[in-house]
Image (spheres, rainbow, N blue to C red):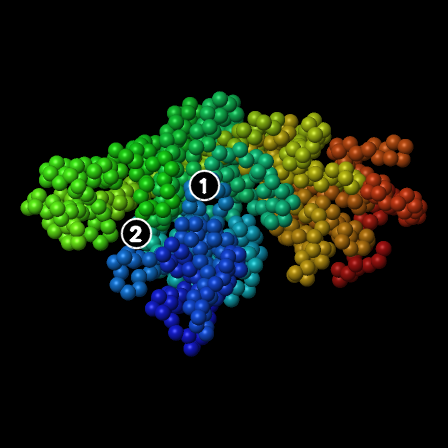
Amino acid sequence: MPKVSLDSSQTTTPMLQQYLEIKEKYKDTILFYRIGDFYEMFYEDAVVASKVLDIVLTSRNKNDSNPVPLCGVPHHSMQPYLEKLVEKGFKVAICDQVEDPETAKGVVRREVTRVVTPGLMGVLESDAGKVGETHYLCAIHRDKKRWGLALLDIATGDFRVTDLVADPKVLLEELITLRPREIILSELDLDGLKLSMFACVTRLPNWVWEESYARKILQEQFGVTTLSGFQCEDIPEGLIAAGAVFHYVRETQKVERLKHITALKKFERGDHMILGPESRDNLSLQDLIEQVNFTRTSMGRRRLQSWFEAPLLKKDKIEARLNTVEELLNHQDLSSQIQKELDSVYDLERINSRLSLGTANARDLKALGASLQSLNCVETLISEFQSAEIQKISSAWDSFSELAQDIEKHIVEEPPFVLKDGGLICDGVHSELDTLRKLRQDAKSAIAAIEDRERKRTGIHSLKIHFNRVFGYYLEVSTTHLSKVPIDFIRKQTLANAERYITPELKEFEDKVLGAEGRIKILEYEIFCGLRDRALQQVPELQAQASRVATLDAFLSFAQYARENKTIRPQIEESGVLEVRSGRHPLVEKNLPSESYVPNDLTMHVDEDRLLIITGPNMAGKSTVIRQVGVLVLMAQAGSFVPAASLRLGLVDRIFTRVGAADRLARGESTFMVEMCETAAILHHATERSLVLLDEIGRGTSTFDGLSIAWAVAEHLHDKIKARTLFATHYHELIDLALTRPGIKNYNVQIQEEKGEIIFLYRLVPGGMSHSYGIHVAKLAGLPPEVVERSKEVLKNLEQGELESEGMPRIGKKRPKKEGGQFGLF
């Protein structure tokens, strides 16, 4: 973070001295210091911010020998600048004026009202827009045996806690899955895992990590005397991490409680399928989510993403989701009507967050009111459904009709962003406000009426009413008519040819007119605050309603995807079967011409054909087939219908993938090393319930080394782990594995040879393929004809028999053991 650079010889003004005192308390932030209509930055903050934000760097006290670097952003449009800084990993302290500049004596008092950090970016969503991202703040408390992990998305109120075995691999895997924006550690934590590679790291004092303090701060947040109701008593390390999270939130957001954070939820790694980073990438998880995403709200988008990122492991829970999707699918008209209403629903979770933080503006309230009006219509529609999940939503549905009506009645259609400048409140809701507005609007005609009345009363036809900033409103009478001046005129000024007077009526009118604008702004702000406070009191109920809307929206998205993409309901079992009929890869199918996609069949079972060796040329579709199976399994356990003619699925605890070639040069890891590390992780963590997808093993080293490794890996997966495995390879020698073990079967992606050319049929069929047809693919890629012909000659020279005389594969033969357990020679 930028540090203040101040020459010892520099003198500072009282205002800059105040800035330096505040900056001293927030050394690790960029300080947004409010001056008038701008947030200003000084010294090194200004230098850094001007570069990041691409704004002009100027200076204060330009005539001094050491001018102070300065840049600034308008206070009413500082949001995009703030977001840009935080996205770049900076923390920003917002320092506001906390007293009226017009009444302040000396330097206006200023205080930091909140600190925005990468993990608390959710507080920046200021337009009630439809944003579907999560911004997790994560705290890690590391003990010798167990590590506590707590997560908070302040925008949505999602607050979760768990504990993990003290295993760096498990922790890193969880962090990769959860993708926090900021990680909180203690001052003593040496960060040997280099967590700063994953997110911004913040240190908190050691005393924050005491269990007694964590319990106290959490009990205060939830208004309870014990945390047993959250079922977290058995994970003290997790509670300590949760306490650290909330301490950080209180310190940065300057609040004691956040009403939209209503619970601390315990989550277990065993509750959901685990998807490592390689599987997420290789299965194109984000693209898949967008393919299935027909949600109408950002809340629904986040819920849908969470379902895909953590598919279910319990058959009854999956079936409950599938039942809901099926019912919605069968009632298309009702589903479409609900979706139409949801189109008008804003991000209630983020609005609740801003209500809790005291940053909600009139646009937020207007968005809340409009959303609640639409949700009133949804209540009637969902009552028609019978599935357990929707019945659960329907029975708890809250209309908030009174709050919605009051917001509609009070807040103008398009309220301004700034709260204290007026223009927020409708006419007809407050008598004094209406009177003041009428007075402001009718001031000119009212003055004319007073002037006309005074002329008639006094008989002075030349009498005029004028206004200036010194005297305000006054009556001016020429000296020739002074004898007609009534006794109630009060002299204010004598001129050469005239006298100026005021009257009690004119003074009262002046006070009303001049005070009307200020009073209007004050009244509007008071009315708004009263309405906002009413909404704040209902934040816990609004938060629960937001969760119901998110779930409903995600189910409707599943149903619409199912309706538009020729899908079926998967059959979920507790067995070890995996049977696909006419399965299709949703992403590949989308990018192909209509009706050109070739569906595929596949059958596996942990007790019979649990490892399938898949051969075939490049471009034939091996990778597509094996990834397709992974995608279908993921979709089914997330609760979605799948693109296939049928799918029988014995539940999968994890999907492992080893696909493609990539290096990690920054870590000094070659392509082959990366491949071996990923393979090792699979062999260490896969179980009999896992699905393993391997696309080429051992290709990054010599042929004999690679083939040997691939053979041994396949044997280990079959013999020891017994996981259902799809193993795509160009080592056609591996097809001989099927001769050694009944649980290994050969499949190939079919081609057709005609006159020395190959035609890709993209169909998976039983049986192995003894040629890779790489030379044919090389020809298609445009290699010179002479190179292609020479390649064919060399290939013939290299080809040789692979089987022993008794018909067993030579490569799979084991050497007999000598005494002492040592292997002998063949």
Q: Is residue 477 left or right of residue 645?
A: left
Q: Is residue 658 left or right of residue 749?
A: left
Task: Point out the residue furthest to the front here.
Answer: 480
Q: Residue at x 65, y 50 (%)?
A: 682
**In the image, residue 71 lies at what x, y percent?**
46, 60
Q: Is residue 30 above or below residue 265?
A: below
Circle 2 sits on which residue?
225
**In the image, residue 505 lies at what x, y percent?**
13, 43
Image quadrant assignment for residue 73: bottom left
In the image, 321 versus 106, the foreground residue is 106
**Label annotation for residue 129:** 1
Q: Is residue 689 above or below residue 212?
A: above
| Mark 1 nearby-residue class (10 Å; few <14, some 14–19, many ≥20) | some
Q: Is residue 174 above or below residue 580?
A: below
In the image, 266 versus 82, the foreground residue is 82
In the image, 316 versus 135, the foreground residue is 135
In the image, 340 versus 735, the foreground residue is 340
| Mark 2 nearby-residue class (10 Å; few <14, some 14–19, many ≥20) | few
Q: Residue at x 15, y 54 (%)?
A: 494
Q: Residue at x 60, y 42 (%)?
A: 285
| Figure quadrant of the C terminus | bottom right
